[in-house]
Image (tube, rainbow, N blue to C red):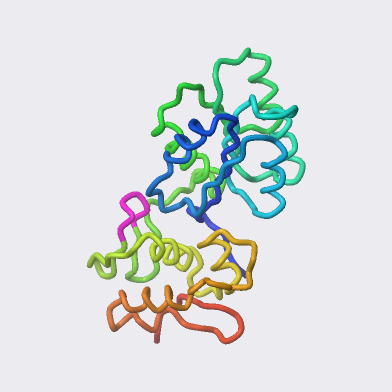
Amino acid sequence: MEISLNFSPMNVLIVEDRPSVAQAIAQCFDGVDLITKVQIAHNFETASSRMRKKHYDVFLLDINLDGSRNGLELCKHIRQTNKESLIVFISGFIRDEILEQLYAAGANDFIRKPFVRKEIRLKVVHWWNFIKAGWTKKPCLEYHDMSYDLERSMFTINGKIIPLTKALRRLLILFLQNPATIISYSRIQREIWGDHDTSMKNRDFKGRLFELRKRLPASHKNWIKSEAGEGYVLSRAD
């Protein structure tokens, strides 16, 4: 059985009618390892269309959107089929009764404009950790002598730092979350690249796995194993 724990990479959808503001919000997540993909929509219809093609873990919504339908209606629409994703409204001053309606519709939080970028980033990561694992957040993922410090994005084996690219760190997090568990090819693509299309076209995941193995010391190169026709597994070599 595949286990889904804290710190899974996430897809973010920003729904904001002003392109410059939407881009500013997107920039809040530059360099954040947990973020797989950030996409933007400016109205209810475009957001709904994107949701039919991709699963989003985080929604950042404005109340006022282009077109006839607003962010409150979009929030209700999201919650009809998606009870678990994070919904945060980022908007200007609103009356108390509107704020109550947002929370009643399923919003998790509200950030007032003009916003501070760091606040958006911190709140999204905090809420994501809380939703995925409650208050059981661990600062490190560990498997035998392997350790990944999530706060510093640092991977060590027996205390020695192993430098990794952002893509390799995402892949490693997935393995360390699910040790001794076969992870399917489609799940690797979905969680690392955020694609629903699991055909693996143009996705050199084998090359990434080869690169990850190459970074490991000789004693650990065989810990990431291929299971023919099923996927890959992180398992200590006997």
For image coordinates 47% across by 78% down, the residue present is 206
Q: Image height check: is 13 above or below 62?
A: below
Quarter in which the N terminus is drawn? bottom right
Q: Image height check: is 126 above or below 216?
A: above
For image coordinates 53% across by 57% down, the residue present is 5
* Magenta-tinted stretch: 149-154
- The verdict on residue 208 being magenta is no
**Main SS of residues in magenta:** loop
Front one among 221 and 120: 120
Front one among 208 and 98: 208
Describe residue 152's horizontal placement relative to residue 234 as left or right. left
Front one among 168 and 68: 68
Residue at the extreme top: 95
For image coordinates 37% across by 49% down, the residue present is 31
Q: Image height check: is 58 above or below 204?
A: above
Front one among 18 and 4: 18
Q: Image height check: is 91 above or below 207?
A: above
Describe residue 88's horizontal placement relative to residue 126 as left or right. right
Quarter in which the C terminus is drawn? bottom left
Relative image position of residue 40 (x, y in whole percent): 57, 42
Relative image position of residue 35 (x, y in whole percent): 47, 51
